[in-house]
Amino acid sequence: EILKEKNISSSAEKENYEEVMVESIKRAQARATESGVFFFFKTGVTKIRRYRGLKDGLDSIGASYSGVYRQNVLDRCICEIRDCFNAAKDFGFPVFTANRTRIDLCFQRRHHPEIKIQARITDGHGCIAAGEKLVQEVQRHSLNSTLTTENMFDWHITYSFP
């Protein structure tokens, strides 16, 4: 919708990332305000640092920032492996709990709680190191505040071990 309005071709979308994202966020915020609900936008610290126009646009609407990270880096590693996130591809792969064979359900696993999936970790040290590096980056560039997902979502996190 925004691309059409601003006459931006799909091939030029990357060059106009900041403008399109800021406009999308402004519209989402306006809708949230009209509906009387809270608007939450999630992005990585690196994007905020890389795209100055994105930060400036968020500042223009009075956005507040919080650096959020998962304190339990092993839990994060397992989750990223089970979801097949690119950042974890060198650290392991998801497997069926029952027979330990590889599965490619990836993020879609979250829509199938009946299917039990575990992570086969092939480089635990590397995954932990990557997680710790990310935690340090968030702490270093936390903007207004820093908190852990464990504290933020403590009311709904449950751990189950087969």
Image: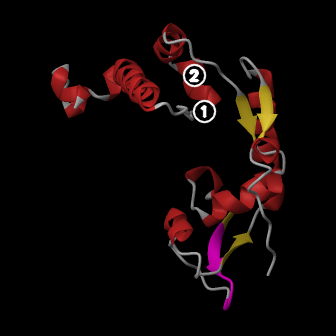
Q: In this view, does 148 lie above or below 18?
A: below
Q: In this view, does 124 lie above or below 30?
A: below
Tell me where residue 3 appears, x and y as whole percent.
22, 27
Identify the image quadrant of the C terminus: bottom right
Tell me where residue 113 appears, x and y as whole percent.
59, 75
Q: Nearer the viewer, residue 161 or 47?
A: 161
Dot 1: element:
loop
Q: In which quarter of the image is residue 83?
A: bottom right
The mark found on residue 59 in the picture is none
The mark found on residue 48 in the picture is 2
Q: Inspect the image, locate mark 1, and give the three-letter code of the amino acid beneath it.
A: Gly
Measure the C-alpha gap from mark 2 to mark 1.
7 Å
| Magenta range | 93-99
Q: Is residue 90 visible?
A: no
Badge 2 vs badge 1, beta-carbon distance below 8 Å: yes
Q: Can residue 10 be seen in this view?
A: yes
Residue at 76% from the left image edge and 44% from the top image edge: 149
Q: How many marks?
A: 2
Identify the image quadrant of the N terminus: top left
Q: In this view, does 160 lie above or below 64?
A: below
Q: In this view, does 127 lie to the left or right of 107?
A: right
Q: In which quarter of the image is residue 119?
A: bottom right
Question: Crowdedness of circle 2 by 10 Å Cα count: few (<14), some, many (20+)?
Answer: some
Tell me where residue 150 appears, x and y as whole percent.
80, 47
**Residue at which label 1 appears:** 44
Q: Is residue 66 above or below residue 150?
A: above
Q: Residue 98 magenta-drawn?
A: yes
Question: Crowdedness of circle 1 by 10 Å Cα count: few (<14), some, many (20+)?
Answer: few
Q: Which of 31 and 57 is in front in this view?
A: 31
Residue at 60% from the left image edge and 19% from the top image edge: 49
Q: In this view, does 44 lie to the left or right of 2?
A: right
Q: Is residue 65 left or right of residue 37?
A: right
